[in-house]
Amino acid sequence: MDNGPFVCTGCALLCDDITVELQDSRVTGVNTACLKGVSRMKGCASPMPCTVDGKTVDENTAIKEAARILKEAKHPLIFGHGNSTLEAQTKSIELARKLGAHIDDTSSFCQGPLVEAILNGKLPTCTLDEVRHMADVIVFWGADPSHSHPRHLSMYSYFPRGKQRQRGWEEDRTAVIIDVRRSDTAAVCSDKLYEIPVGADPEFMGALLSALSSKVPKTSFNMDPKRILELANILKKAEFGVVFAGLGMTYSLNSLDPLFSLMNKLNETSKFHLIPMVGQYNMRGFDHTLFRETGHINRVYFGGEKVEHGPQQSVVELISNDVIDAAMIIGSDPLASLPGAIAKKLSKVPLITIDPCENLTSRVSKVTIPSALSGVECGGTAIRMDGVEVVLKQIIDTKKLADEQIITRIMEEI
Ligand code: SF4
């Protein structure tokens, strides 16, 4: 019996030191993981049923019905993929090409712009292992990893000793928090909290830029210029700095230009990197895969003469403008994450949901197909939040198909 170590797919940190206890082909105990990871590795509280129109059916019937819906739709959308392996994501893109469908993922309304800028070489980045071994200044900007990625501070960013940071957090690392409130991360690791008003991130980037250029920084919210100059001084002196960019930062930036200017300025005097705080375990994987195949990370349409991409192809625009007439959702729960009015509209089109666990979207879906839980019931590969590829091992046997096997079967029916 293999007890590990295994990789946890509870979030995009993909902790790789998880050991488990097994009994009768079930995970009964999980060691090392945080609570979020334990609940992920133990499986779904409500497993997904296999249904068509709310009636329990066998897998073949559900797959045939899913294929029929997609084939008959003029503008099908394939959406999700954040909790699917790279192998499933690749198959999903193949299916979208075959159907001439729209394809998108959650990065479309969260960390997509940052991942895109990194893949296009516009933002310097680094790995979490480099952070552990080398980082002396860590900035959590609009991010609260103690909730979103509970082992972030202990595994990589703040507490652990590294090759060049032998004294760890006590003497070798400085953590800075820029946020709209005193987060729990601030309470754990920093007295260097810069509280800014909601939406003031671009303005604060401008003030920091001034301070880094030895000008007196001014803000409309009257932060003491001395405090901003003090922060600029810490950042300037960093040997290896990293900004962990959370949704709080991303949502307040209409354009990435203020961030580009700040990162460029920081890199005139020190070495600064940025890692987006991606949530779902393989959201970044989808962006990498689609980028490799089309040059775009999300918002793609395969139905035209050539691949189309742009804001009009985003899941939100497609639903708002009543473009799509069917949708297949894989490893995601858009009804729980999209704005209410958009989610309501989405629920009106025929939906197919493929997921190990029941969720809000599956409850209004015409077809639901249960899939194996990746990293537990099936293996595969994924891209960690820092862009590193990680291998997921299967822990227990299951009769359920993996996402990519379900998509392959749907393609065969089409
Ligand atoms: Fe799993 Fe994320 Fe917790 Fe690590 S931090 S154990 S990957 S949920």
Image (cartoon, helix red, strand yellow):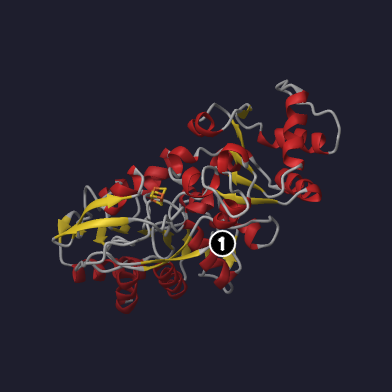
Q: Quadrant of residue 259?
A: top right
Specify the amino acid type for callout 1. Ile
Residue 142 lies left or right of residue 241; in this view the side is left
- Residue at image position (57%, 74%) is 305
Judged from this view, the residue extending furthest toward the bottom is 412
Residue 23 lies left or right of residue 343; in this view the side is left
- Residue at image position (37%, 46%) is 335
**Quadrant housing the C terminus:** bottom left
- Residue at image position (57%, 52%) is 162
In this view, 341 is above or below 377 = above
Q: Residues within 10 Å of mark 1 (few under 14, many from 20)?
A: many
Judged from this view, the residue extending furthest toward the front is 166
Foreground residue, 57 or 43? 43
Q: Count numbered badges in the picture.
A: 1
Rendering coords of residue 130 (x, y %): 60, 56
In this view, 207 is above or below 325 = above
Rendering coords of residue 329 (x, y %): 37, 58
Foreground residue, 292 or 352? 292
- Residue at image position (53%, 61%) is 287
The reply to whether residue 6 is visible in this rendering is yes
Rendering coords of residue 367 (x, y %): 25, 59
The reply to whether residue 52 is visible in this rendering is no
**Quadrant housing the N terminus:** bottom left
In this view, 340 is above or below 7 = above
Foreground residue, 68 or 225? 225
Q: Quadrant of residue 193?
A: top right
The residue at which mark 1 appears reads as 297
SS at circle 1: loop
Foreground residue, 174 or 180? 174
Q: Mark 1 near ligand 1 (CB under 8 Å)?
A: no
